[in-house]
Image (cartoon, grey):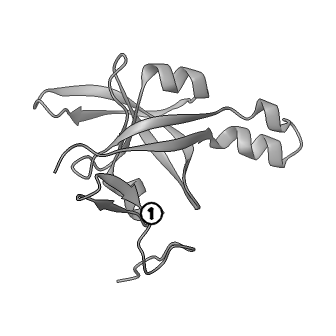
Amino acid sequence: MGLVYADIELVNSDDIALFNAGVKNTGEVRRETVTMLVDSGSYMLCVNEKIRAQLGLKTIIRQSAQMANGDITEVDIVGPIEVNFLNRSTSCRAMVLPGENEPLLGSIPMEDLDVIIDPREQTLKLPPDRPYMAQKSLK
């Protein structure tokens, strides 16, 4: 299986709350569509410093993280971020990767979006048996 990429819309959830409270207008809600590597081996949403700055995401906490090459480093955890793909949406925190590292869509947001990786077509898609609404497992 090759690498799978998907266009994911990321929105600053704090901006959405301020819009809903009538403090911001639609044009002030920071959002960006990002081509992300779909990475089921990563469990979190990962953005880079450029995306963080563009969305104005604030640090919630700092944590240590093990990178793909095995190095352990401290990273900022930011959020909340609204994650949109096709007709699916979820809200989560994101790990900030240093510099302009490739952003990753990890398994936690993928699970909550209820999407699947199609290895044959190398795409992220909706499950064919539930294309209109996400389904959650309660067990």
- Residue lying at 26% horizontally and 33% vertically, measured from the top left: 64
Quarter of the image with the C terminus is bottom left
Q: Residue reaching furthest top? A: 99
Q: Quadrant of residue 73?
A: top left
Q: Is residue 96 found left or right of 82 in the rendered image?
A: left
Q: Is residue 66 found left or right of 131 in the rendered image?
A: left
Q: Which of 6 and 47 is in front in this view?
A: 6
- Residue lying at 43% horizontally and 40% vertically, measured from the top left: 94
Q: Residue reaching furthest right? A: 22
> Where does the image place residue 39, in percent across and percent down from the top left?
27, 47
Q: Does residue 48 lie above or below 92 as drawn? A: above
- Residue lying at 44% horizontally and 63% vertically, measured from the top left: 112
- Residue lying at 23% horizontally and 58% vertically, measured from the top left: 119
Q: Is residue 33 found left or right of 95 in the rendered image?
A: right
Determine whether the residue tagged by mark 1 lies in a helix, strand or loop: helix
Number of numbered markers: 1
Q: Is residue 12 found left or right of 108 in the rendered image?
A: right
Tell me if mark 1 has few (under 14), some (14-19) or many (20+) residues whose alpha carbon lies within 10 angstroms of its own: some
Label 1 sits on residue: 112
> Where does the image place residue 6, in percent across and percent down from the top left?
41, 45
> Where does the image place residue 2, in percent across and percent down from the top left?
19, 45
> Where does the image place residue 96, in percent across and percent down from the top left?
39, 29
Q: Quadrant of residue 87?
A: bottom right
Tell me the amino acid under the disc marked 1: Asp
Q: Residue reaching furthest left? A: 70
Q: Which of 52 and 104 is in front in this view?
A: 104
